[in-house]
Image: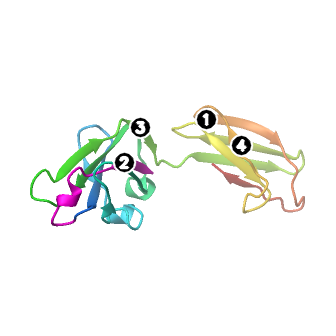
């Protein structure tokens, strides 16, 4: 999510879109090359005009679907740049740039081996970011809680109570 606060000090004197501004968003993963975030990678309404006042800031949130926009990307120097436009003839735009943050759209890799004989799940998970996983006997993961590993890889064997001993199924979410 991209959260921002905006105001327009001369909004009531505007003639094109008084009391409204629009925003566009760009990203960089290297600090140099900026790419526009297209509307189909933002939530509905994120690029619509937003109501503003002259004095008080109004907070808005835009939702960026980075996973589908820049798949298989890991960057610790990602930034968002936002341009706000009040559509007037002079002093109509301002630009704000976020500080760097990490974006990780690379899927983790994982393997799990079930042993009904020993009632264990052997699990190996690797990712670019700190790993969290959850296991469940239920496909909706009801009753499961996230387990934080605190690292980028883990290999462990867990004692597990299978719901069905004949054909055990355990669901893994990383």
Q: Residue at x 53, y 38 (%)?
A: 129
Residue segment shown in magenta? 1-17
Of the pair 50 and 62, the residue shown nearer to us? 50
Are the residues tagged 4 and 3 within 8 Å (C-beta)?
no
Q: Give the numbered dot on residue 5.
A: 2
Q: Secondary structure at mark 1?
A: strand
Q: Which residue is mark 3?
A: 101
Q: Earlier in the sequence, mark 3 or mark 1?
A: 3
Q: Which residue is mark 1?
A: 153
Q: Secondary structure at mark 3?
A: strand
Q: Earlier in the sequence, mark 2 or mark 3?
A: 2
| 3D distance between C-alphas at marks 1 and 4 | 10 Å
| 3D distance between C-alphas at marks 3 and 1 | 21 Å
Residue depth check, mark 2 versus mark 3: number of the one nearer the observer = 2
| 3D distance between C-alphas at marks 1 and 2 | 38 Å
Q: Which residue is mark 4?
A: 123
Verify whether residue 166 appears in magenta.
no
Q: Secondary structure at mark 4?
A: strand
Q: Is 151 positioned to the left or the right of 128 in the image?
A: right
Are the residues tagged 1 and 4 within 8 Å (C-beta)?
no
Q: Position of residue 40 (x, y in %)?
A: 36, 66
Q: Residue at x 52, y 49 (%)?
A: 107
């Amino acid at each position: 999510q991209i959260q921002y606060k905006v105001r327009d000090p001369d909004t009531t004197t505007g003639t094109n879109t008084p009391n409204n501004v629009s925003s566009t968003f760009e990203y960089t993963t290297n600090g140099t090359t900026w790419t526009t975030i297209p509307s189909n990678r933002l939530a509905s309404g994120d690029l619509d005009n937003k109501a503003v006042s002259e004095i008080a800031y109004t907070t808005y949130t835009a939702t960026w679907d980075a996973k589908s926009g820049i798949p298989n990307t890991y960057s610790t120097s990602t930034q968002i740049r936002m341009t706000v436009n009040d559509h007037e003839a002079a002093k109509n735009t301002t630009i704000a740039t976020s500080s760097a943050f990490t974006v990780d759209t690379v899927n983790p890799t994982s393997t799990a081996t079930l042993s009904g004989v020993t009632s264990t799940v052997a699990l190996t998970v690797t990712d670019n970011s700190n790993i969290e996983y959850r296991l469940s006997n239920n496909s909706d993961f009801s009753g499961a809680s996230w387990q934080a590993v605190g690292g980028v890889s883990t290999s462990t064997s867990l004692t597990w109570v299978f719901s069905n001993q004949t054909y055990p199924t355990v669901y893994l979410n990383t």
